Amino acid sequence: MTDNIAMPDGAVLATKQVAGAHRPRITVGDDLSGAMMTVTDGHHDVHSETAYHAEIVDTTMLITEYIGISFTTPPAATARVHIFIEWGSMSIAHIELLEAPALANGSALGSFNRARFSDKATAVTNLKSYDSTGIDTIGGGTQLWAEYGFASFKTGSRSASQDEWVLAPSASYAIKLTADANSNAGQIDLSWYEHPDAP
């Protein structure tokens, strides 16, 4: 069911209640052309205060050393977690997304709500950073995705269909960046939003 609501500035809001959804979808119409204007779910969740960011960097990495981020997703009844991974390295390196990895130690890692006026905390738990030069380890698990940089490398923003992963509920994940050459450095940027609807 869709209801059109006229706004004072002439724009039209079309609100559609989706079956099973916890909130309406809002579409804004352009004043001049009447064309529908939309934003992605991820962008909308920034404004809804349910989008988050965490990152780690290591400026001195040797070959086979790695850094990583791990976390546990909330139950499906709480939220579905959608992630986007960006990364960079000074030299040859590769990154992996692992499901149900074997984890040891790690350090608590903070996250930021991307709506900076909000104090709403993430539903993700056990958010940790890892550095293999100490006692931290990330091993095993199912490799869902891997990407290799064969020289100095930095990912850019790509379409959601390429980058977005909708993760299983109540599951553990790790993102692991490994140096494949000496005199290296690396950074992982993890962004995610927590959507209350079905994936």
Image (spheres, rainbow, N blue to C red):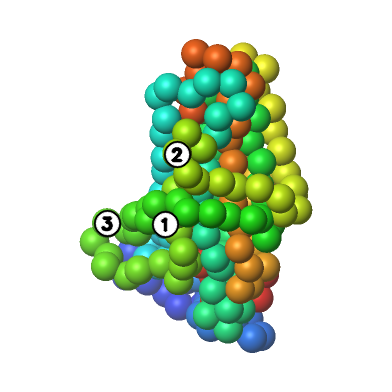
Q: Amino acid at mark 2?
A: Gly
- Asked if the residues shown at circle 1 and circle 2 are in contact, with their CB atoms under 8 angstroms apart, the answer is no
- Identified at 54% across, 73% down, the residue is 74
Compared to residue 27, the image places residue 52 above or below, namely: above
Q: Quadrant of the N terminus?
A: bottom right
Compared to residue 103, the image places residue 147 above or below, namely: above
One can see residue 172 in this view:
yes
Q: Quadrant of residue 52?
A: bottom left
Q: Judging from the image, what secondary structure is the residue with disc 1 in?
A: strand
Disc number placed over residue 116 in the picture, else none: 3
**Marks 1/2: CA–CA distance:** 27 Å
Disc number placed over residue 129 in the picture, else none: none
Q: Can you give x and y, in whole percent of width and height, for residue 17 in the image?
A: 58, 83
Compared to residue 108, the image places residue 159 above or below, namely: above
Q: For mark 1, what is the residue?
A: 52
Q: Judging from the image, what secondary structure is the residue with disc 2 in?
A: loop
Q: Residues within 10 Å of mark 1 (few under 14, many from 20)?
A: many
Q: Residues within 10 Å of mark 3 (few under 14, many from 20)?
A: few
Compared to residue 168, the image places residue 70 above or below, namely: above
- Near-viewer residue (185 or 88): 185
- Near-viewer residue (129 or 4): 129
Q: For mark 2, what is the residue?
A: 134
Q: Can you give x and y, in whole percent of width and height, for residue 190 in the image?
A: 49, 47
Q: Amino acid at mark 3?
A: Arg
Identify the mark nearer the N-term, 1 or 3: 1
